[in-house]
Image (cartoon, rainbow, N blue to C red):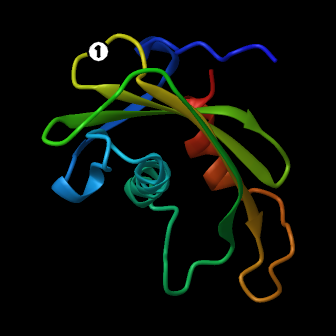
Amino acid sequence: MTRPVPRARTHYRWFMTIATRWADNDAYGHVNNTVYYEWFDSAVNAWMVEQDMLDIAAGDPIALVVETSCSYFASLAFPESVEIGLAVAQLGTSSIRYRIGIFAVGADTAAAAGEFVHVVVDRANRRPVAIPADWRTRLEPLAD
């Protein structure tokens, strides 16, 4: 198995900053691996809210997470903030594969990187539907 390599900041199209919390650190003094997945979810959903694509109470269709992965390259710890980079790696008929990088503030290469996959589904029956044209228009600029 080939070990993934960290991507440079230039591989990501949108960024947000998140402050780490005391509770994010584990017994080993660095951010626990589960927190990275929270950051992935927060970044994708923040971008969707910013793009007016996420209506939690009544939106239809909705996007459900079906796959995630993360590789770790460098340690991060409270009290530093982190920058989350987002790009679209693949835009399918009903699925979106996001590429996410977690960076120490100002770092050129990711401390962690992974993927986060959404499948767009009908709210009522949870069956896949085509990505709406207005969503696709907003997603395409994130593609690399």
In percent of width and height, residue 118 lies at: 69, 55
Quadrant (top left/top right/bottom left/bottom right) for the C terminus: top right
Q: Is residue 82 above or below residue 7?
A: below
Q: List x then y, in percent, for residue 55.
A: 49, 75
**85 or 6: nearer the viewer:** 6
| Residue furthest to the front | 27
Residue behind mark 1: 107
Q: What amino acid is found at the position of numbered circle 1 in the picture? A: Ala
Residue 15 position by quadrant: top left
Most foreground residue, 23 or 114? 23
Q: Horizontal and vertical percent for residue 59?
A: 58, 78
Quarter of the picture holding the N terminus: top right
Q: Is residue 58 above or below residue 51?
A: below
| Residue at image location 32% in from the left, 50% down from the top | 26
Q: Using the rendered view, name the quadrant where residue 74 is placed.
A: top left
Q: In the image, 47: left or right of 88? A: left
